[in-house]
Image (cartoon, rainbow, N blue to C red):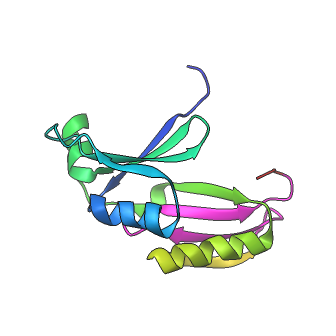
């Protein structure tokens, strides 16, 4: 396997709500919902960076496609990280996420590893870290 990721898919309860959060609230570009001609195909893709997209897909569709039973979400099992260029930008992104409807679960603060970071959950409970790492370019 070549070490690359091209798509991150988040299972969501309400596709329209997730689009509003990521597109309108966080400003991520999308063409909106596509795939509605398929029984479990309605999905939205957001451009993150060159070669990487974020997809939001109903949890029921993800369950049907994989064959795995639908279980309650478990937000503490992984997080996505968004690295920024300064401590001030960490604060700005967390504030933007909160205005968009996110829940701030850990306000920005000095991190044990020497940077500055905080966490928010999107409307479906997916955990995002917003971090400034002086040793890692944003």
Q: Nearer the viewer, residue 65 or 46?
A: 46
Outermost residue toward the top? 1
* Residue located at (46% from left, 56% from top): 77
| Residues drawn in magenta | 110-135
| Residue 122 vertical position relative to residue 7 in the rendered view, above or below | below
The residue located at (59%, 70%) in the rendering is 119
Q: Residue furthest left?
A: 39
> Image quadrant for the N terminus?
top right
Q: State which quadrant residue 15 falls in.
A: bottom left
Where's residue 96, x and y in %?
Answer: 57, 75
Give the total number of marks visible in the rendering: 0
For the point 22% across and 45% down, the residue is: 61
> In the image as oriented, which residue stretches furthest toward the front?
31
Q: Is residue 134 magenta?
A: yes
> Where's residue 38, x and y in %?
16, 37
The image position of residue 4, as x and y in percent, is 59, 30
Q: Is residue 25 magenta?
A: no
Q: Position of residue 55 (x, y in %)?
A: 41, 46
Residue 126 appears anywhere in the view: no
Instruction: Judge from the rendering whether residue 55 lies leftward or rightward of residue 136; answer left or right.
Output: left
Q: Nearer the viewer, residue 37 or 126?
A: 37
Residue 55 visible at all? yes
Q: Is residue 7 left or right of residue 72?
A: right
- Image quadrant assignment for residue 22: bottom left
């Amino acid at each position: 396997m070549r070490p690359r990721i091209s798509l991150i898919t988040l299972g969501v309860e309400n596709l329209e709500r997730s689009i509003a959060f990521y597109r309108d609230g966080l400003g991520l570009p999308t063409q909106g919902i596509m795939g509605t001609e398929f029984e479990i195909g309605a999905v939205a893709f957001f451009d993150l960076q060159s070669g990487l997209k974020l997809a939001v897909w109903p949890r029921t569709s993800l369950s049907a496609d994989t064959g795995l039973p639908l279980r309650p979400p478990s937000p503490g099992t992984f997080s996505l990280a968004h690295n920024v260029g300064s401590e001030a930008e960490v604060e700005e992104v967390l504030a933007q996420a909160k205005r968009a409807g996110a829940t701030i679960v850990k306000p920005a603060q000095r991190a044990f590893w020497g940077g500055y970071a905080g966490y928010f959950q999107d409307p479906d409970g997916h955990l995002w870290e917003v971090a400034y790492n002086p040793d890692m370019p944003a």
